[in-house]
Amino acid sequence: KAGVTQTPRYLIKTRGQQVTLSCSPISGHRSVSWYQQTPGQGLQFLFEYFSETQRNKGNFPGRFSGRQFSNSRSEMNVSTLELGDSALYLCASSIGPNNEKLFFGSGTQLSVL
Amino acid sequence: QKEVEQNSGPLSVPEGAIASLNCTYSDRGSQSFFWYRQYSGKSPELIMSIYSNGDKEDGRFTAQLNKASQYVSLLIRDSQPSDSATYLCAVNSGGYQKVTFGTGTKLQVIP
């Protein structure tokens, strides 16, 4: 069974640009969560989708948005990039809607110059 | 107060010893608790989950949960150099899938 796939693996952008990250969950998994990981803050919850609905959102500005498609694939968008957005963005999938174990992808390393 | 707190370490233990990793959480309504291991440059991987008070053993790993004290711990017996990694405590504090992570404890097992 294929794992969680995130693309691209690396991204370099400049301030003010926007970026879209993609995540394909494990087959049969319907929940997709997104996290931002930085050395100082650790893993910070961005949002979670289940059946195309955003059910939870973390404490991030509105520049961070996402969506989930009917095949459970998810995208995350960051607009008007800032230097502080440089981080590893991790996607995780889980089978069901509640209290489930997370399976992480390899992440997208975003560098904002 | 952070929702999930861990000592950042590093925690250094000799090979063969027991490593004890601790975590406290703030939300009394939390329902499920996890330990993830993250090697440098890799993504987190689940190693233990625990849902009720008491101990849960899986091989060399034992997770302990005390909801009254809002405390979760992970014991690693017979520690090996390959156990050297950052261990992340994670808590699901809502009915939905909102999992909050601690900042992790770095474990170093000295040969």
Image: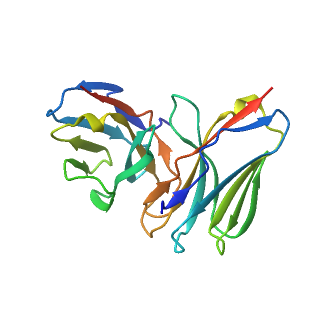
Q: Quadrant of the C terminus of chain A?
A: top left
Q: Residue at x 52, y 31 (%)?
A: B42
Q: Nearer the viewer, residue A56 or A1?
A: A56
Residue A26 position in % (x across, y down): 44, 43
Q: Is A95 rendered above or below residue B79?
A: below
**Residue B81 at x, y percent in the picture:** 75, 29
How many numbered marks does the figure carry?
Answer: 0
- Image coordinates of residue A15 in percent, x first then y, are 17, 31
> Which quadrant holds residue A106?
top left
Q: Give percent across and percent down for residue A107.
A: 40, 34
Say which quarter of the image contains residue B8: top right
Frontmost residue, A75 versus B72: B72
Residue found 34% across the figure and 57% down from its top? A58
User: Would residue B57 appear left or right of A97 to someone viewing this image?
Assistant: right
Q: What is the basis of the colouring in this image?
A: rainbow
Using the image, determine if residue B30 lies above or below residue B99. Answer: below
**Of B70 and A55, the residue lying toward us:** B70
Of residues B83 and A73, the one nearer the viewer is: B83
Compared across the picture, whether B86 is left or right of A18 comes to right
Q: Residue at x 62, y 69 (%)?
A: B70
Q: Residue at position x 60%, y 61% from top?
A: B24
